[in-house]
Image (cartoon, grey):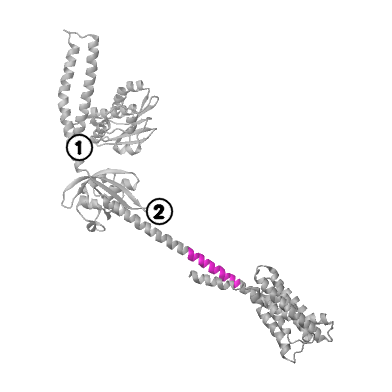
Amino acid sequence: MSALFAAVRRRIDLDQTSPLLRHFPTTLAMTIAIVIPLLVPSAPITQPVAFFSFIVVAAASVVLAAWFSRRPETQWVMVVPLVSLLAIGLLRVGTGGAGSLFSSLIILPVIWIATEEGRRWVVVAGLGTAGAIMLPFLVLGDVPDDRVEWLRGFIAPLVFTLVAAIINEISRQRRAQFEAIRSLAEARETSLAELEQQADQLRRSELELREANRLTSSVLDSVTMQAIIGTDLVGRIDVWNPGAASILGRSATEVVGRASILDFHLEDELEDRSRELNYPPGATVLNPGFSALVESARLGIPEIHDWTYTHRDGVQFPVEVAVSPRVDASGTTTGYIFVATDITQSVEVSRLKDEFVALVSHELRTPLSSILGYLELMQDDEEAPLSEEQQLYLGVAERNAHRLLSLVGDLLFTAQADSGGFPLAIETVTPSELIGGSLDSALPIAERAGIQLSAEVDSDAQPFPGDRRRLGQAIDNLVSNAIKFTPRGGSVRVGLVADPAGQLEITVTDTGMGIPAAELHQLFTRFFRATTATANAVPGIGLGLVITQAIVRAHGGELDVTSVEGEGTVFTLRLPQEAATAGVR
């Protein structure tokens, strides 16, 4: 099509012919006019001088046409048809004057003049015609004898002028048509070029997409230790890497487009998770478990959760699953990606570590108790009183022994919590007394640290059943953490609110250093310490929040945290006011 448009353009450009080519019909006619008088006796030369002048002027018009052909852009090229009219006028003078046989040759240069762009050339053609027709009268000095000759001198230029006007209009329309064709050809050529460019872009995009797909496939195929599973919005599997085939024992042809991600989960776990999330709305009412599985990802919250998968042979094993949404170019979620890691070995190592910690803690507790007993006996021995220096040394040993015993107690507590529960001494707990006791214990520490400690207690909070000592321990942990992580001049506020739904909400808010958002999900992991704690040398071993969460969950409650690094942290402890003791044994 590009060649066709080029041909059309070349055809349109033929309108710009050279002056020599346009002058060719007039040249040919004047050549014939020179030959005829010489060969035809009935066409005598009446004025040799005028006839000879005609030949000279005609030759000059040809020379001018040839010269202007080298410079077609100049407007002076119109001198050629005007000179031709002069030559034809001289021809008429030399071959009979008004009655010359060659008067009709005037039409040839008139056509040339009339085809030029602009109405002014019609006037030029008319004046030139009048000059050529009236030239015999001007040269010979003859005056028309009658009205017919006068009319002939008037009518003929008028007719030629009308013809010139018609030709000029036709030329104008022809130019407009050619310009329209030219514009159309250029537009089509431009469109074709754009289409070719788009086609090239599509080909490049296709190659890039194929390369991206190949790269993605190679990456997925290279991951053999983790299962990467892709699903649509309702859980139907459409991506299945070799790692998934290895871990779950099924090939891609068996599951892609045929199986659901729910086929590998335990229904009880999905139901429990749905209950925790208060049954979030799913993509369909037929699989509410899938909604619980992807709810955090749907809300844009990163989450790594532990689940139990089922192998093809029925063997169940623990996995750590990270879920993320899969979006298209417009940002609309089109499905989900599950990255599952088999943590069977990690769980077993953790279990062995717990057993070891419990065993060591138990073995350490007995000698520590004995050490504390003997230290107390030595301090209280009246028969052999100790000096002040000896009392100081024994006091240091006693404080460190108590600290070590407290650490052993924490280790034993976490081991009990991981084993499925720990004993609770249920009694009636008054919320205001619980908060007051924690504040009384923490106030001296807060004053030494230069931190303002305050409380805001709801007077409508009613007593509830719970373990007073354990709950006090949980609140003490939160308050002491808030004080440790708040620099001098900051504040810690404890709030207590009872909502109409029957829940007791205790908040501990500080203006401390905060916790990085990327570390919040690890906050309740044993021995984990935030980077802000290690960077600022805040003392601790990373068990306080683990113990606090275990106590809260044992009472059927929840513990949440929100934090902004550099601004502060808020821990929210929610407890049911009715009896709910999941951890009682």
Q: Is residue 191 visible?
A: yes
Q: Position of residue 227 (x, y in %)?
A: 25, 49
Height in image: 236 above or below 89?
Answer: above
Q: Which of the 4 image quarters holds residue 533?
A: top left
Height in image: 430 above or below 235?
Answer: above
In the structure shown, which secondary structural element does the residue marked by tag 2 occupy?
A: loop
In the structure shown, which secondary structural element does the residue marked by tag 1 occupy?
A: helix
Region rendered in magenta: 176-193
Q: Position of residue 176 (x, y in %)?
A: 61, 71
The answer to if 488 sits in the magenta stretch is no
Q: Nearer the viewer, residue 580 or 89?
A: 89
Q: Residues within 10 Å of mark 1 (few under 14, many from 20)?
A: few
Q: Position of residue 210 (x, y in %)?
A: 35, 58
57 with respect to 18 (left or right): right
151 with respect to 8 (left or right): right
Q: Residue tagged by mark 2? A: 330
For the image, the number of numbered tags is 2
Q: Earlier in the sequence, mark 2 or mark 1?
A: 2
Q: Residues within 10 Å of mark 2 (few under 14, many from 20)?
A: few
Q: Nearer the viewer, residue 462 or 102?
A: 102
Q: Residue at x 21, y 32 (%)?
A: 414
Height in image: 220 above or below 403?
Answer: below
Q: Position of residue 89 (x, y in %)?
A: 76, 80
Q: Residue at x 24, y 28 (%)?
A: 468
Quarter of the figure that contains the C terminus: top left
Q: Residue tagged by mark 1? A: 350
Q: Amino acid at mark 2?
A: Ser
Q: Amino acid at mark 1?
A: Ser
The answer to if 191 sits in the magenta stretch is yes
> Looking at the image, is mark 2 or mark 1 nearer the viewer?
1
Q: Residue at x 69, y 76 (%)?
A: 62
